[in-house]
């Protein structure tokens, strides 16, 4: 599928800042399931955009915008050609052995409730990794409801699971927490999802998890949609949790009253048959 | 466009590119044999030339020994060798004649003019000087054809198939030239990193006109892994495998967009480009440069046959 994405992140300041420095993880990499045909980052302020790679292999862009200014927009546009790999992720840049992704982080730390949930799924379904993970995907998808109200970007897995509500970030954190609890290396993937229901305007990007299954490799699990990753998923950044894969992180010198607006458009670019 | 037209354009470009490559190999080998060997050692440069041209088995069917006369004749003038410079230009010209209407006037002039001048060289040069002049003429002819295609062709599927041929052949050629060093053994009393080693690497870089480019990119002396990096992974180097595949993917993408469908050829090209983008030179050297090159040549050939299956038959 050829997917066209436009993702604009706008910061509006009541009091203009003197300087803003940001690190962007907005650029997808090629792997066996996707090829980036075109990708472009645009900033509303004139400054130098420097590209590097972080420790996990994500493409990073960093810049410093000199103020004062009332707002700052980071706009990304591009086209990605994806193909279905049955959820298996191969051909990626892997800087670490899978065991590193067993590491707990504050956002994904499990608590007794999460541990109980994970173990109850295992007790009901046996130890075979792939069926177990699929059942957990379905169980979590039923257990937690998608709700944008009660949580925010600093909500931990434990807090979200207590509420039994959250956005894709929270469901993904809980899924990762459960997977690591059962001994599977798991990581957080930030990216985009092309919706089959024709809705192209979204308020945020999408997030899902990847779990390492022995003899198979990394497999993508999307707890928000209750499916494994398909050709509708565009993989952008990976990390141990949201903080490692966040699209925009930064600091600001001076200024205040900051509001954030995110607009994402994901639709299919020109009809094309695959033979 | 008829698949036969696309086939002729694709192979026309490949033959012209191949002729230039053979001229470069012969040039590089001449330089290597001119190096002083102050001891009695086996001089295997001419054998390596035949190996990198990929026609070792055919060569040894016709000749017993790989020396300057035999190899030069076999690679440049032999009618028995379907990939000699003469055969390449003759096949290129007959392909061009078949698709005369798809070529511009400049392109036809270039390839036909080359074929006519080829006759003047008869059965081969009589001296080393004549050979040098001949090789330079071959490279200029190839440049003239390539340049006229780039400068005058309409950007449609005829153009994209031509460029596809150029870049697939060029990627294959660069991979083989890098492999030359593998076949070139250092004599026993020479050390790795010593002067002979340096000259061998410099000769390889010179054969792809990359010696100065190397010093612009890496401000240090010649190191094998950096030579490999320049010719495999660097997008800035126009002959590198990465740069060729960037162009191959772009041309296949344009063809796919024009025809409204993609297939195995596009997927294979992207897979190779992704693997090149995600590779690092130390990983390649650890696995073995020769093995990497061998794998790459196989995958590149596979792309050639996928393109043929998908578009040219």
Image (cartoon, rainbow, N blue to C red):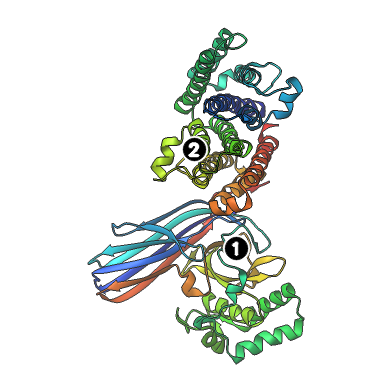
Q: Which residue is mark 2?
A: B195
Residue drawn at x 67%, y 59% as measured from the top left: A85
Picture residue at 70% right of the left edge, 69% below the top: A214
Side (left or right) of A48 relative to B195:
left
User: Is residue A46 placed above or below A237 in the rendered structure?
Assistant: above
Point 54% across, 88% down: residue: A163
In the image: residue B202, left or right of residue B301: left
Q: Indicate whether A70 appears above or below B190.
A: below
Mark 2 to mark 1 CA distance (whole Å): 64 Å
Kindly give the residue lying farthest to the front in the view shown: B39
Q: Are marks 2 and 1 in contact (CB under 8 Å)?
A: no
Is B93 situated left or right of A17 in this image?
A: right
- Residue A75 appears in which quarter of the rendering? bottom left
Residue B263 visible to an observer of this rendering? no
The picture places residue A129, in percent across and down from the top left corner, at 72, 74
Expressed as whole percent of the image width and height from the top left, the position of residue A103 reads 56, 78
Q: Quadrant of residue A12?
A: bottom left
In which quadrant of the rendered image does the N terminus of chain A lie?
bottom right
Q: Residues within 10 Å of mark 1 (few under 14, many from 20)?
A: few
Q: Residues within 10 Å of mark 2 (few under 14, many from 20)?
A: few
**To which chain does the residue with label 2 belong?**
B
User: Is residue A243 positioned above or below B283 on the image?
Assistant: below
Foreground label between 2 and 1: 2
Rendered location of residue A190, percent (x, y): 52, 68
- What number is the disc on residue B310? none
Q: Nearer the viewer, residue A35 or B263?
A: A35
- Asked whether residue B228 is in view, the answer is yes
Q: Secondary structure at mark 2?
A: helix
Residue A155 vs A69, above or below: the answer is below
- Disc ID at residue A196: 1
Say what secondary structure mark 1 lies in.
Answer: loop
- Percent from the top left, x then y, of residue B271? 61, 49
């Amino acid at each position: 599928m050829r997917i066209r994405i436009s993702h604009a992140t706008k910061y509006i300041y009541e009091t203009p800042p003197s300087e803003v420095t940001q690190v962007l993880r907005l650029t997808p990499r090629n792997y066996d399931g996707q090829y980036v045909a075109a990708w472009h980052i645009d900033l509303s302020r004139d400054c130098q955009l420097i590209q590097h790679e972080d420790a996990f292999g994500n493409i990073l862009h960093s810049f410093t915008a000199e103020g004062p200014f009332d707002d700052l927009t980071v706009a990304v546009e591009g086209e990605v050609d994806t193909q279905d790999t049955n959820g298996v992720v191969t051909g990626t840049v892997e800087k670490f052995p899978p065991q590193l992704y067993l590491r707990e982080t504050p956002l994904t730390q499990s608590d007794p409730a999460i541990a109980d949930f994970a173990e109850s799924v295992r007790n009901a379904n046996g130890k075979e990794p792939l069926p177990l993970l699929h059942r957990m995907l379905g169980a979590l998808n039923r257990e937690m409801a998608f709700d944008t109200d009660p949580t925010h970007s600093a909500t931990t897995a434990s807090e979200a699971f207590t509420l039994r509500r959250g956005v894709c970030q929270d469901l993904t954190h809980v899924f990762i927490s459960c997977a690591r609890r059962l001994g599977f290396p798991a990581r957080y993937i930030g990216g985009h999802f092309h919706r089959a229901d024709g809705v192209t305007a979204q308020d945020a990007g999408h997030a899902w998890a990847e779990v390492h299954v022995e003899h198979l490799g990394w497999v993508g699990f999307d707890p928000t949609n209750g499916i494994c990753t398909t050709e509708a998923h565009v993989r952008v950044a990976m990390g141990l949790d949201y903080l490692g894969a966040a699209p925009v992180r930064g600091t600001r010198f001076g200024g205040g009253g900051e509001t954030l607006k995110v607009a994402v458009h994901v639709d299919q670019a020109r009809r094309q048959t695959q033979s | 466009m008829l698949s036969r037209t696309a086939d002729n354009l694709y192979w026309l470009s490949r033959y012209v590119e191949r002729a230039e490559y053979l001229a470069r190999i012969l040039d590089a080998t001449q330089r290597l044999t001119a190096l002083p060997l102050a001891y009695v050692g086996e001089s295997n440069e001419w054998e390596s030339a035949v190996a990198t041209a990929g026609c070792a088995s055919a060569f040894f069917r016709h000749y017993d020994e790989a020396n300057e006369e035999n190899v030069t004749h076999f690679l440049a003038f032999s009618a028995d060798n379907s990939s000699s410079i003469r055969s390449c230009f003759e096949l290129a010209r007959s392909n061009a004649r078949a698709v005369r209407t798809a070529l511009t006037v400049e392109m036809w002039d270039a390839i036909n003019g080359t074929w006519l001048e080829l006759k003047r060289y008869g059965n081969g040069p009589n001296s080393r000087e004549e050979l040098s002049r001949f090789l330079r003429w071959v490279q200029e002819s190839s440049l003239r054809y390539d340049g006229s295609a780039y400068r005058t062709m309409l950007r449609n599927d005829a153009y994209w198939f031509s460029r596809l041929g150029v870049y697939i052949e060029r990627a294959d050629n660069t991979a083989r030239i890098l492999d030359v060093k593998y076949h070139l053994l250092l004599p026993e009393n020479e050390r790795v990193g010593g002067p002979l080693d340096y000259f061998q690497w410099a000769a390889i870089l010179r054969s792809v006109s990359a010696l100065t480019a190397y010093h612009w990119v890496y401000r240090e002396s010649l190191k094998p892994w950096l030579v490999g990096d320049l010719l495999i992974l660097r997008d800035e180097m126009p002959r590198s495998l990465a740069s060729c595949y960037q162009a191959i993917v772009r041309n296949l993408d344009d063809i796919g967009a024009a025809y409204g469908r993609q297939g195995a050829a596009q997927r294979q090209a992207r897979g190779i480009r992704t693997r090149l983008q995600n590779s690092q030179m130390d990983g390649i050297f650890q696995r073995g440069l020769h093995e990497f090159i061998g794998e790459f040549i196989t995958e590149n050939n596979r792309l050639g046959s996928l393109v043929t299956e998908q578009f040219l038959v």
